[in-house]
Amino acid sequence: MDGRARVAWHLRRLRVERGLSQKALAVDAGVDRGYVSGIERRSFNPTVDILDRLASALSVDVSKLFALPADNEQPPSPLRPGRRRS
């Protein structure tokens, strides 16, 4: 798994674990919601500054975004559709 895939995996996992929508995370990190979506889809290659801001919004060290997932770890499930807290 390459670095971009690791970041996408952990960004989505952490966001879903905290019950945050992409919009809520984007607001907390001061980035565009579409950019968060692009990172999770591996379309965008975020800068270290953006990764720092996202990690801070998720209350984790930026290194957590680069960790290898455990062999038996399943991909994060999507949040339920509908309104999310913002």
Image (cartoon, grey):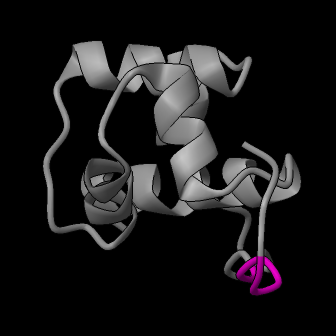
Q: In the rendered image, which quarter contains the C terminus?
A: top right
Q: Is residue 72 toward the left or the right of residue 26 in the image?
A: right
Question: Between residues 48 and 69, which one lies in front from this camera angle?
Answer: 48
Residue at (51, 30) in percent of width and height: 27
Residue at (19, 37) in percent of width and height: 46
Residue at (44, 16) in percent of width and height: 53
Above/below status of 32 relative to 6: above
**How many labels sit on residues?**
0
**Residue 67 showing in the rendered view:** no
Instruction: Find residue 61 and report its horizontal and vertical position in percent.
Output: 62, 15
Q: Which residues are magenta?
A: 77-82
- What is the magenta segment's predominant secondary structure? loop
Above/below status of 11 relative to 55: below
Residue at (85, 55) in percent of width and height: 19
Is 34 covered by the magenta stretch?
no
Q: Is residue 16 toward the left or the right of residue 57 in the image?
A: right
Is 80 covered by the magenta stretch?
yes
Question: Between residues 74 and 48, which one lies in front from this camera angle?
Answer: 48
Above/below status of 45 relative to 22: above
**Residue 7 showing in the rendered view:** yes
Instruction: Find residue 1 and report its horizontal and vertical position in percent.
Output: 37, 68
Question: Between residues 84 and 46, which one lies in front from this camera angle?
Answer: 84
Instruction: Find residue 84 and report its horizontal and vertical position in percent.
Output: 78, 61
Q: Which quadrant holds residue 28?
A: top right
